[in-house]
Image: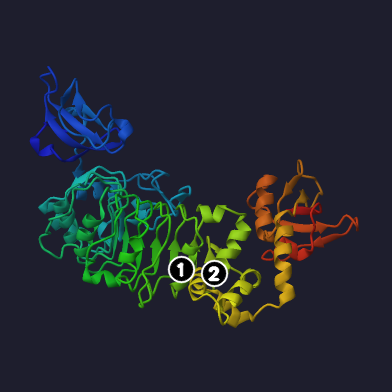
Amino acid sequence: MTGSSPDLLGRRIELDGHFGIVKYIGPVGSSRDTWLGIDWDEPERGRHNGTHNGVQYFKAAQATSASFVKASRVNAGIGLLEGIIQRYTAPTDDFCGLSQAELAFEGDHNRDAKPIELFGMVKTAQRISQLATLQSVLLTGVPVAFCSTEDASELSSRLPSLTELDLSLTLFHDWVELARVAKALPNLRVLNLSQNVLASPVGFVPDPADSFGSLESLVLNKVGLDWPECLTLWRLAPKLRRLALSHNAISAVTGDLPEHAANLLELDLAFNPLDSNCMAGLSCRLPSLKLLNLAGCQLTEFSLPDEAQAPFPSLESLALSGNRLADWASVSQLHRLPKLSSLILLDNPLWTAQDEATSRQLAIARLPRLRLLNRSRIERDERFGAEIDYLKRHYAQYRDLTAAGGDPEAAAKFKRLHPSLPVLLDKLGAPDEAEMAGTAARALKDSVLEVRLRCKRADTGEQADGSHEAPAGRMLVQHLIAFIRKAFRLPPTAHVELFYLCDNMPGIEYPMEVETREVLYYNIASGDTILAKYS
């Protein structure tokens, strides 16, 4: 950086790969030098809260996120056009200067990053000789900070085909600059501004008003915005179909949605401290929404408003993993979503209160239209078994409560908790008394079923080290295979087949071929042995 202009106040800067915002320019203590007071994005990067020797020079966001540095050390950033030219036209390695960390994406918030091949990045110097051919620009971590009026004019002529722009983890801060960028790229459909500390957009009026008019996808993960600020931006993008707002400061989802909210297809609110009743304000105002991500939002319940209109009438995929849901009534609420076909429930108290196989059965039986649960396909045999068992367990109580002379209030409460039961009755019919009488006894037997596990190579017969025991219970064969992979530390690519060994008939191996069946289907008793052969 050259000089220490007051214009830097409120601007983003970079130093040694770390990003922050300038909140003070001037002397510190007895020093005659000019210092910059930086509030760093990473709290551990700083040393204090903006106070030095008892004097508060500025107020930092965190107790240890601030420090003072010499103005000559920081990088105040470069123009957007210069950053694009440097990355996409200068001869460099096959990935145009991108590190392996940059060539990665995070599919789930709790999963490891996976490498991806970005279209147009391989052998960039040879394949992209002119900026006019670019459709996607990735500038993650590049210290681009502004777009001058002159640069905006050049962007329009040099990048006529650009539809996707990733400005995550850059130095952009001002919405005036960002509006200038968006207006200069008339075909821009996707804009990613994640991991930037952005100025509040409340009260901001772009010039011209339709600067963000072409956007269909806006990604604002980890930018520190609250819900009113997000609504302000949403109103500026009338064609928006996808809105990502994870890891922000959103708690209450209130206020009037923009008229074009009816066109939104995907909404990501993951890892926001949401109020458990937040869906009441959204469920009937997003009629086109197909995907909703509420993972890690600290929800203690999931409730929908008691309105005649169907909530989220188009919702197909819902992520609720990593919350605090402890009551299956929250899952029963999802029965009201007419098109829900994919659900993620992992890492909730209701899911971990029993073994995974039992939790999976309970969820499947409650949601007859579900096709994917925790990203695993629900096979026909698995659904049939779950629904039959569920019906046997709850039919007697349902019959008694709905019979003449029953308690109407108790019956209504039961139906709210088990809304799928009438559907299952129509589909499967009422179970007979003998089947229901055996359900409780069988459940007790299932819960204590213990089996011995052995493992060997299919081709050589070499035994794997050690042996293990497993509480098989209502576990599916496919889940037992997953348990065996971990217990015997088998390669992830190994093909595993299971065989049941009966102590009464030594030397005979019964293949357990159908992975979607329960272990109990094969008439296994406690103390029996299951042999795993891998290749």
Query: Viewer-proximal residue, 532 or 91?
Result: 532
Q: Is residue 129 visible?
A: no
Which numbered dot is residue 202? none
Local secondary structure at mark 1: helix
Asked where in the image residue 362 lies, by quadrant, the reply is bottom right
Identify which amino acid the numbered label 1 is placed on: Leu
Residue behind mark 1: 334
The CA span between labels 2 and 1 is: 9 Å
Residue under the image location 23 percent in, 62 percent down: 255
Give the left or right position of residue 371, taking residue 461 as reference.
Answer: left
N-terminal of the pair, mark 2 or mark 1, is: 1
Residue behind mark 2: 366
Relative image position of residue 448 (x, y in whole percent):
73, 53
Relative image position of residue 224 (x, y in whole percent):
27, 47
Residue under the image location 46 percent in, 52 percent down: 322
Q: Is residue 288 visible?
A: yes
Give the left or right position of residue 460, taking residue 32 as reference.
Answer: right
Q: Residues within 10 Å of mark 2 (few under 14, many from 20)?
A: many
Q: Colour scheme used in the picture?
A: rainbow
Asked where in the image residue 354 lies, by quadrant, the reply is bottom right
Quadrant including the N terminus: top left
Q: Are the residues at dot 2 and dot 1 in contact (C-beta closer than 8 Å)?
A: yes
327 is higher (above) or lower (below) than 30: below
Give the left or right position of residue 362, taking residue 47 as reference.
Answer: right
Query: Viewer-proximal residue, 341 or 531?
Result: 341
